[in-house]
């Protein structure tokens, strides 16, 4: 027997645009956190949530936004991680970014076992849209947005920054990310193929659409691209070629190639890891108008 309509309405969760926000809980180190905030409803999918890390002291000016996109070969990963080398940091990397003056939104997106491309980009667009619609109550300035991703997350961050209809994105930090998914085109079992739902050779138009290298355009926001020269999982040539193509298109681009570093900064000395993180963060502040005073 069907449930009464008023009961369905009663037990259905409010739409993310209307749901009350959870209180921001202090987590120490000058940072407070809104954890597990639903931002989108996707029929048949798990709830899509984000965590919002905010500095305790915000001042009177709305905060610039940093959208963090996690890695994991589009197949796994957690929204609160920036790679295994940074797991042991205290304060953690997201708290450090927030304490420096950014609002940090670390977001879920559907993985390739749940949905194929472009579902992941659609989810991240939804997250940006939700943050924009609720920016006034959250104290955000989404016209000053940096996207930052590592590995598969860097690939998605690059695609967001290269879209021509997201003018609020003012910069992209891309760590050791694939930029061309048309390579290794015949193998249907690679992470790239699982993202696309087929071997790239079988879906060539989709593979091009999913390749930041093939989406470079004039007028894109600035890029900070970093990669280990000894990367055994995503060849550093991906970042070299992306930086070259961006530069040819007149996009301000800073490329950092770190000798001896493998994927996810494996093998990189601790001081150099701290440096590339600090340089990435300082660059991000530069493209949104500098650190708050």
Image (tube, rainbow, N blue to C red):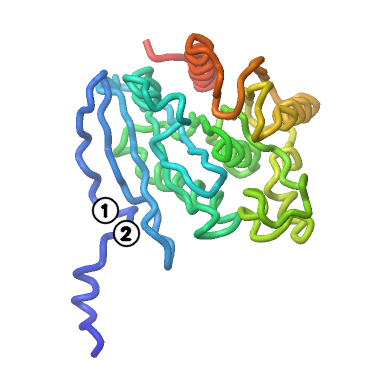
Q: Quadrant of residue 261?
A: top right
Q: Which mark is residue 151?
A: none
Reading the image, the residue beneath label 1 is: 19
Q: Quadrant of residue 254?
A: top right
- Asked if labels 2 and 1 touch by Cβ distance under 8 angstroms, the answer is yes
Reading the image, the residue beneath label 2 is: 15
Q: Give the residue displayed 36% in from the left and 48% down from the top.
A: 49
Apparent side of residue 122 relative to residue 215 in the rendered image (left or right): left
Apparent side of residue 192 relative to residue 34 in the rendered image (left or right): right
Foreground: 266 or 154? 266
**Within 10 angstroms of label 1, few (less than 14), some, or many (20 or more) residues?**
few
Which percent across, then down, holds residue 186? 78, 54
Q: Quadrant of residue 150?
A: top right
Quadrant of image for the N terminus: bottom left
Helix, strand or loop at disc 2? loop
Which percent across, then down, holds residue 255? 67, 19
> How many discs appear?
2
Which percent across, then down, holds residue 282? 50, 15
Q: Give the residue displayed 54% in from the left and 16% down from the top.
A: 276
Which percent across, then down, holds residue 293? 37, 10
| Real-space CA distance between mark 1 and mark 2, rounded to the nearest whole angstrom | 6 Å
Helix, strand or loop at disc 1? loop
Foreground: 116 or 287? 116
Q: Give the residue displayed 23% in from the left and 80% down from the top.
A: 5
């Amino acid at each position: 027997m069907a449930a009464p309509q008023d009961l369905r309405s009663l037990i259905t969760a409010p739409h993310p645009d209307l749901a009350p926000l959870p209180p921001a809980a202090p987590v120490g180190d000058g940072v407070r956190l809104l954890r597990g905030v639903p931002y989108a409803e996707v029929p048949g999918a798990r709830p899509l949530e984000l965590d919002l890390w905010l500095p305790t002291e915000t001042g009177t000016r709305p905060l610039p936004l940093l959208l963090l996109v996690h890695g994991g070969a589009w197949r796994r990963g957690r929204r609160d991680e920036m790679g295994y080398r940074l797991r042991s940091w205290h304060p953690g990397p997201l708290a450090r970014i927030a304490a420096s003056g950014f609002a940090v939104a670390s977001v879920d997106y559907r993985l390739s076992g749940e949905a194929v491309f472009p579902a992941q980009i659609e989810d991240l667009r939804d997250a940006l849209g939700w943050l924009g619609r609720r920016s006034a109550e959250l104290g955000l300035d989404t016209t000053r947005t940096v996207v930052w991703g590592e590995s598969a997350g860097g690939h998605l961050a690059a695609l967001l920054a290269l879209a021509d209809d997201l003018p609020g994105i003012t910069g992209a930090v891309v760590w050791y990310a694939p930029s061309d998914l048309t390579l290794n085109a015949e193998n249907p079992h690679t992470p790239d193929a699982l993202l696309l739902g087929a071997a790239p050779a079988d879906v060539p138009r989709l593979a091009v659409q999913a390749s930041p290298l093939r989406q470079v355009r004039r007028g894109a926001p600035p890029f900070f691209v970093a990669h280990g020269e000894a990367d055994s999982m995503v060849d550093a040539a991906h970042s070299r070629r992306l930086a070259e193509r961006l530069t040819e298109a007149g996009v301000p681009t800073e490329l950092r190639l770190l000798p001896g570093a493998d994927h996810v900064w494996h093998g990189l000395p601790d001081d150099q890891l701290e440096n590339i993180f600090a340089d990435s963060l300082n660059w991000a502040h530069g493209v949104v108008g500098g650190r708050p005073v």
